[in-house]
Image: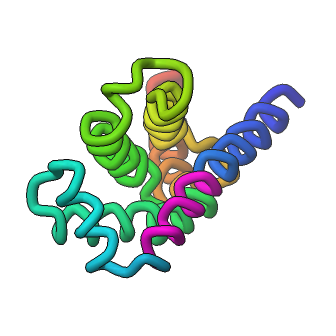
Amino acid sequence: MFARVKDVTLLLGRIGIAVVFLAHGLQKWDNGIAGTAGFMEKVGMPMPTVAAIFAIAVEILGSIAFIVGFLTPLVGLGYVVVSIGALLSVHIDNGLTGQGGYELVLVLAVAGLALGFNPGRISLDHALFWRKRENRQAASGDALLTA
């Protein structure tokens, strides 16, 4: 019972984090690559066009992948990179809390990273990769018990 509850809460966590990143990615998409790159250049981000494309891809495509639980460690790392860029270029001068502070950026990055490396059993990663590893480990454990 506890394992099911844990897996559902991990799924809900992934969905919650992904929805926030997806909303920001769709805002960037609406502004276009040029508009997003222009903003990034204005706040002093290096290689603003590359940064804009990366942020849009992570926040839209990565969020879709995060919701279904596919390649979650990579998406979690992508969330951290995007968040560090936002924190250093936009939010750092506003402090941790208050208007424009970086508390939300920090929480999203850390939660995305944590969930990326532990997406739970309700994920494509588990179905495609980790279940096979668990079966191999169980089989090798059974072989040790019978030896």
Name the residue: 37% across, 42% down: 83
Q: Nearer the viewer, residue 7 or 41?
A: 41
Q: Residue furthest left?
A: 47
Main SS, magenta residues: helix
Q: Determine if the magenta segment contains residue 110.
A: no
Name the residue: 73% across, 40% down: 7
- Relative to 57, is 96 on the left or the right? right
Total marks shown come to 0
Q: Determine if the magenta segment contains residue 23.
A: yes
Q: Residue furthest right?
A: 1
Q: Can you tell which quarter of the image residue 32 is in? A: bottom left
Q: Which part of the image, by quadrant, shows the C terminus?
A: top left
- Point out residue 44 in the picture as x, y percentages from the top left corner: 15, 49
Q: Residue furthest top?
A: 96
- Point out residue 91 in the picture as x, y percentages from the top left corner: 37, 34
| Relative to 3, residue 62 above or below | below
Name the residue: 53% across, 55% down: 21
Q: Can you tell which quarter of the image residue 36 is in? A: bottom left
| Relative to 43, residue 111 above or below | above
- Point out residue 9 in the picture as x, y percentages from the top left corner: 76, 37
- First to last magenta residue range: 18-29
Name the residue: 84% across, 34% down: 5
Residue 95 visible somewhere in the drawing: yes
| Relative to 12, residue 124 above or below | below
- Relative to 53, is 79 on the left or the right? right
Q: Nearer the viewer, residue 29 or 4?
A: 29
Q: Which part of the image, by quadrant, shows the N terminus?
A: top right
- Relative to 3, is 82 on the left or the right? left
Residue 140 visible somewhere in the drawing: no
- Point out residue 136 in the picture as x, y percentages from the top left corner: 46, 44
Q: Nearer the viewer, residue 95 or 83?
A: 95
